[in-house]
Image (cartoon, rainbow, N blue to C red):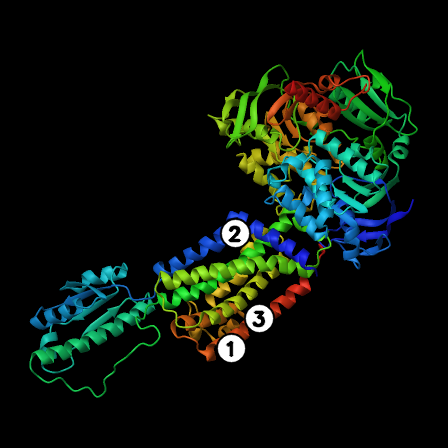
Amino acid sequence: MSKLVTIDGLTKRFHNQNRSALQNVTTQIESGRIVGLVGPDGAGKTTLLRLIAGLLRADDGRIEVGGLDPVANARQVRKRIAYMPQRFGLYEDLSVGENLILYADLRGVVGSARKETFERLLEFTGLGSFTDRLAGALSGGMKQKLGLACALVATPELLLLDEPSVGVDPISRRELWRMVGQLTEEGITVVWATAYLDEAEQCETVLVLSEGELIFDGRPTDLTAGVDGRVYLVEGIKGDRRQVLNRARQHEAVLDGTIQASDVRLLLMETAQVPSLDSLTGGAGARLRRIPPRFEDAFIDLIGGGFRAESPFARNSERSHGATIVVEARGLTRMFGSFTAASEISFDVRRGEVFGLIGPNGAGKSTTFKMLCGLLKPTSGEARIAGVDLRTAASQARARLGYMAQKFSLYGDLSTLQNLRFFARVYGLTGAKQRLTIERMIDSFALADKLDENSSQLPLGFKQRLSLACATMHEPDVLFLDEPTSGVDPRTRREFWAHINTMVTNGVTVIVTTHFLDEAEYCDRAALIYRGGMVALGPPSELKARAISPELPSPTFEDAFIALIEQIEAGRAR
Amino acid sequence: MTFSRLAAIMRKETRQAVRDPSTLMISGLLPIMLIFLFGYAVSFDPRELSIGVVVEQPTSETESFVASLRNTRYFGIEVAIDRQVFASRMAAGKLDAIIVLPQDFSATALRGEAAPIQVLVDGGDPNTAGLVGSYVEMLVLNWLEQEWLDRGQPPLAPLVSIEPRTWFNAEVSSRNYLVPGSLAIILTIIGALLTALVVAREWERGTMEALLATPVGPLELLLGKLIPYFVLGLGSFMLSVLVTVGFFDVPFRGSFLALALAASLFMLCSLGQGLLISTLTRNQLVAAQVAVMLAFLPAFYFSNFVFELDSMPPALQLFSYVIPARFLVSTLQTQFLAGNVWAVLLPDLAGLAIFGIVIFAVCALFTRTRLD
């Protein structure tokens, strides 16, 4: 196969960052392939795509697309490639048809060729009956397809897709993969950037980026083969699986561990013996089963293991566990004009539970979430926190909850210590009590090293710890986490969840929203939100069990979600 | 550069402008609001001044003097015997001036000697203070003349007589120069603010990246964005001129062709400023703030629109030559009030043209189809 893109010693620095966005990257992309560009946020994926598209100039090294320099020969190169940036690059105030026409004009697709292309693309994407609709009024999945259609108006040799599937519902995501698969059959080379590690398994080759460096270049199966036989599942745990995980993480043979529904998934060291079950104290019925590795296991192995320390937060005050209901949602409904964002959502959350609101962007989980923490008034229905009605005593209820927003929402120009002091004052802590609380937070979250650094300059894992410290300083009973770890690298994600698990062990109740279906595995129970309604509620293992079929003996959470939605759609059709 | 790509960008911009309510507000509603503001609310014409007259000993002479004050439409008169009452009211800002007619006023005046009248003026507002002073002086002279006539005595023949006539703005109405001047401010806002905003919006929404990754060239992108807003700007300029002449009865004595030419050249300068701002920032909020700081405020202060350049220090007067609004305001005021005065028009047009060329050269230097 011929090489379409040649990259040699490519380095890119941005002046306001101390680390290179890309460091000495060398690789080749063969034509007609689908190449996964995999890595967490900030790994350099977008920078690499922009360099290939000639939108950025490299500081060092060489890059050639079809033998041409993408900056010096920008126009020739851009005629041969198509690039779909994050958020799809659509004009939301133009209709579907007008968006297509704009890109067709810009790429010189006119006359009968245009007519044919439009017909083909509209059929391909299923947008044929929506040509007059404004792009802004489309669902996430339809926007994604329109973005793809706009990129494909003049059939490119190379298609660059920057996180095309982020936040999109799993069915649309699967359709997109099918469509892209079709494109490669037509000879188009596709580079697909993603932070979802599971997507890497579907690519023919993957480029794995971590902190600007290319840490793997090859077939995903070659990478997972390296950890084959080292991945185990601790099943049938009788006691607290979080305790089992905590112990396993400190075991010398264990490289990485995560909660997987009611079980614990372990990645062992290359040369290690399988640890005895006794050392993990999983209870009488527990057993270890070897399972096939996933890409994420291999990724963790590649970066030298997950988070293995004990969460220092373990020393927090104890609360009693029990069957007490802490959060109640009763028929929560919210209308925006004539649009129902959330409809009749009811559930209870018990003390010390991790409860997930899971669903794609725009499904209504954020709306539900905001009604639960008193930021949005429900049109009908009610929400109670620890027995307090949010409509009548919102501030009283809010004093008992902690909230950690999706984006880093601390004051970037204040130092770590100043942020802690500010939030302590917001919670009304003064004098000796404030001092003691701040000391406890510094101690619990190991913040002592960087007290005087501006929080915007902190590394991501550190920022998350500080956010969590600020959200929990007043020892809330309920902690709300809005998309806490989407796009975060797996190691930081594990560390974050280790802290959360410890807090839960201490009796804090956690409600988390996420479009990362994987993250549902960490929950005790999850509510699946789809098109404004709650379509399923239960422990993740139970939800997954519903999707078991002869073809799919061990479904992932995404499989479960899709199966559920298909059942519902089929029910509606009948 | 190909025309089809240029046309595609233009069509897109036009559609977006028409559909975006904020664009229509800035280009339609804002100009009308500003014109009405400068036409009605802002005025430098003397309003009715409140004057306290202290008559220490009322006589028929003081009475006729007070009556002559009452007869003018500029004064609101109050009379008292003691100045203490007025002193505290002037301190509170309720009175603009106090006129004191002393006890021996009649006697002294009729003896033919200079009768002392004390005029106390509130210097807190120097403009009003000066105005009151000169009005009172003029009124005293008139009254004296009238008094002499009434008594059948020939007035003292004045050595010179002044008969002023106001040219160009016969009613001496500040509206007649404020409203035309405000047209320059309107064009500045539409050109600089709107352009800076629409470009920043593309960056914020991520559409710029998608656009740049197509074979579109910098010139196509630049012109495709500018032409629709140029037309929009001229449209709202025409609308504003119509309101100025039709509604506010501001005279128009120049030629529409010259006016349109000046407005077009100025629009280019303004659009160029907007584009330049959009190369500085990719954030709508910052773009709006920078547009106000770099385009709107200088146009307001250094264009001779409200604040007279002649009374500024020479350094600032020199500085005003890099503010394009300066050239347009002088052309506008001349076009409306005086007519086609080529000695004003030609240097102004030349100034605008030079500014436009420089700013577009800088823009072309900065516009790339890359992100860095």
Q: Residue at x 88, y 36 (%)?
A: A219
Are tags 1 and 2 found on a single chain?
yes
Q: Relative to B200, is B100 above or below?
A: below
Q: Considering the numbered disc 1 on the image, is that residue within a helix, a strand or a loop?
A: helix
State left or right for residue A45 relative to residue A410. Answer: right
- How far apart are the alpha carbons under marks 3 and 2? 26 Å
Residue flagged by tag 3: what amino acid is it?
Phe
Q: Considering the numbered disc 3 on the image, is that residue within a helix, a strand or a loop?
A: helix
Quadrant where the N terminus of chain B is found in the figure: bottom right
Question: Is disc 3 surrounded by few (<14), some (14 to 19) or many (20+) residues within 10 Å?
Answer: many
Callout 2: chain: B
Q: Are marks 3 and 2 in contact (CB under 8 Å)?
A: no
Whichever of labels 3 and 2 marks the residue nearer the N terminus, that label is 2
Residue flagged by tag 2: what amino acid is it?
Thr
Q: Residue B96: x percent and y percent?
A: 26, 64
Question: Is disc 1 surrounded by few (<14), some (14 to 19) or many (20+) residues within 10 Å?
Answer: few
Mark 3 — residue? Answer: B355
Question: Is disc 2 surrounded by few (<14), some (14 to 19) or many (20+) residues within 10 Å?
Answer: some
Q: Relative to A284, is A533 above or below?
A: below
Mark 2 — residue? Answer: B23
Residue flagged by tag 1: what amino acid is it?
Pro
| Residue B347: image tag | 1
Q: Considering the numbered disc 2 on the image, is that residue within a helix, a strand or a loop?
A: helix
